[in-house]
Image (spheres, rainbow, N blue to C red):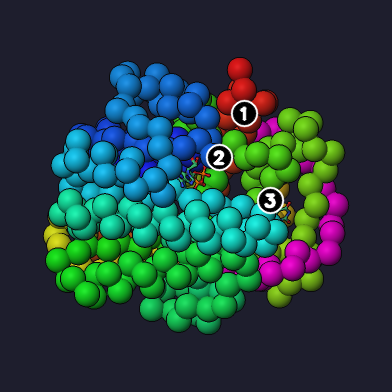
Amino acid sequence: MKILLTGGAGYIGSHTLIELVKAGHNVVVVDNFVNSQPEALRRVAKIIGHEVPFVEADIRDKEAMERLFTEYQFDAVINFAGLKAVGESVAKPLEYYENNMNGVFVLVDAMRRHGCKSIIFSSSATVYGDPAIIPITEDCPKGQCTNPYGWTKSMLEQVLMDVQKADPTWNVVLLRYFNPIGAHESGLIGENPNGIPNNLMPYITQTAVGIRKELGVFGDDYPTHDGTGVRDYIHVVDLARGHVAALKAIAENKGLAIYNLGTGHGYSVLDVVKAFENVNGLKVPYAIKPRRPGDIATCYCNPAKAKAELGWEAQFGIEEMCRDSWRFQKNNPNGYEL
Ligand code: NAD
Ligand code: UD1
């Protein structure tokens, strides 16, 4: 298929780009580098052996989107472009709502005017709020988000569902990611957060490499096996392959389709720390800290629907996730800065 990959220079986008090209798709990337570097795309080119057509643009830029859809006849769009830092979204709600929502409005408007009516959207387990069912299935009711970032995901799901309802010739695939970690096995691309990481794995790798003194473990009094929060960590390459698999829902004209992308296994914060230490032969100093506001105890999915309908399931375990996260950090102590 001919695919427009927005946000393709980012963490999940760059890994997905590789898997799409490997599967034989024709991909054009658009990104404005608000949270990524051109170096990521150079490294992808090194991995796949050639460059991929790239347009530097903001997806909110109507003229740029018009030019893009006039130049290429896309079969589908995979939309990764969006801001994703939870804490920053609390401090800058308008910027988050404006970028994430308006980005999709402009993109989807260009799509419909050019007859490209298939989109895969990056959603998140955050839309389940404090989940009503564990393991979480796709029919678990959506919940209250605890931050503007989460609300942009929840609301954009609704927007896309309404677009599909108004015109059933649309294919809308909502992928709800659980907790992506890990990196490409080459060690060339991986997660490269700006500033102090919010998420667990980058904090662990930055502590292991000496950038941070110790990991703060946010709460040890949750109702979990060791008191620390339990999540469904998924290798980013598995997640990337989930997008290739999701194109099947488009090829089959499924209309609206929603899938959880996770492994179905829950690991606590301390499980992850131990797995990371064991597989990499390192120590990660940590200290127990108070709970982080907005956090929930347990979140993991039932990934059976994606397996049954898309033939996709995660292949990598927590060891590979920890090994590959560390390889990228060790090889790139300053991220993509050369
Ligand atoms: P990322 O920040 O690494 O990638 C997002 C990319 O989009 C970046 O390259 C950024 O420069 C670009 N971008 C942002 N706004 C843009 C705009 N207006 N125009 C053009 N480009 C723009 O994030 P990621 O971790 O790769 O996440 C990709 C998507 O998946 C995001 O929508 C994110 O919200 C969603 N998601 C991520 C996670 C996670 O844990 N990483 C979990 C659930 C959902
Ligand atoms: C967070 C976001 C969620 C987003 C997801 C993936 C919140 C409330 N939710 O989810 O919207 O989709 O990231 O980007 O922020 N932890 C520590 N110490 C740390 C960091 C994390 O103990 O320094 C713990 C957390 O308390 C949690 C687990 O590690 O139990 C995972 O945290 P994190 O990686 O931030 O992901 P989520 O909280 O699941």
* Residue 278 counted in the magenta span: yes
The answer as to whether callout 2 falls within 8 Å of ligand 1 is yes
N-term-proximal mark, 1 vs 3: 3
Q: Where is mark 2, residue-wise?
A: 35
The answer as to whether callout 3 falls within 8 Å of ligand 2 is yes
Q: Looking at the picture, how far across and down is residue 109, in whole percent?
A: 28, 57
Q: Looking at the picture, how far across and down is residue 70, in whole percent?
A: 19, 40
* Residue 40 counted in the magenta span: no
The answer to whether one can see residue 245 in this image is no
Q: Is residue 259 above or below residue 73?
A: below
Q: Residue at x 48, y 51 (%)?
A: 82
Circle 3 packing at 10 Å, graded few (<14), some (14-19), many (20+), is some
Give the magenta range.
Answer: 277-299
Q: Where is mark 1, residue-wise?
A: 335
N-term-proximal mark, 3 vs 2: 2
For the C terminus, the quadrant is top right
